[in-house]
Amino acid sequence: MSSNAEALYKRIEADPAYRNLLFRQALQNPQGALQRICEIGEELGLPVTVEEVKDYISKLDDLDTKQWLIKARGGL
């Protein structure tokens, strides 16, 4: 399913509504943001697990995304 994680990430990145939704989610409930990503994946027919999302994001060369993941894990 790692291909789903990549495809899902690209879909979310391309859609300002999803990005805003996840940003608000991360502010209100950081740990719930990863679960919300999985829910979006289900909605879009790209199912992923929380672990798959974490694994995919950890391999990106995008510092901002990696910082977001640390925040989503509750690292603040």
Image (spheres, grey):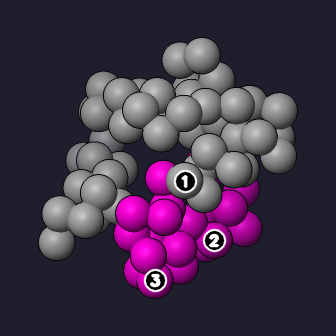
For label 3, the residue is 28
Question: Does dot 1 land on a helix, a strand or a loop?
Answer: helix
> What secondary structure is marked by label 3?
helix
Quarter of the picture holding the C terminus: bottom left
* Magenta residues, start to end: 12-34
Q: Is residue 50 above or below residue 36?
A: above
Find disc 2 in the rendering and name its residue: 21
Q: Magenta part mainly helix, strand or loop?
A: helix
Instruction: Report how many numbered discs are placed on residues in the image.
Output: 3
Give percent across and percent down for residue 32: 48, 64
Residue assigned mark 1:
35
Residue 50 in view in this figure? yes
Q: Is residue 41 rendered to the left or right of residue 53?
A: right
Q: Reading the chain from its start, which is encountered first: label 2 or label 1?
A: 2
Q: Amino acid at mark 3?
A: Gln
Q: Is residue 61 left or right of residue 4?
A: left
| Secondary structure found at label 2 | helix
What residue is drawn where x is 54% and y is 53%? 35
Q: Amino acid at mark 2?
A: Leu
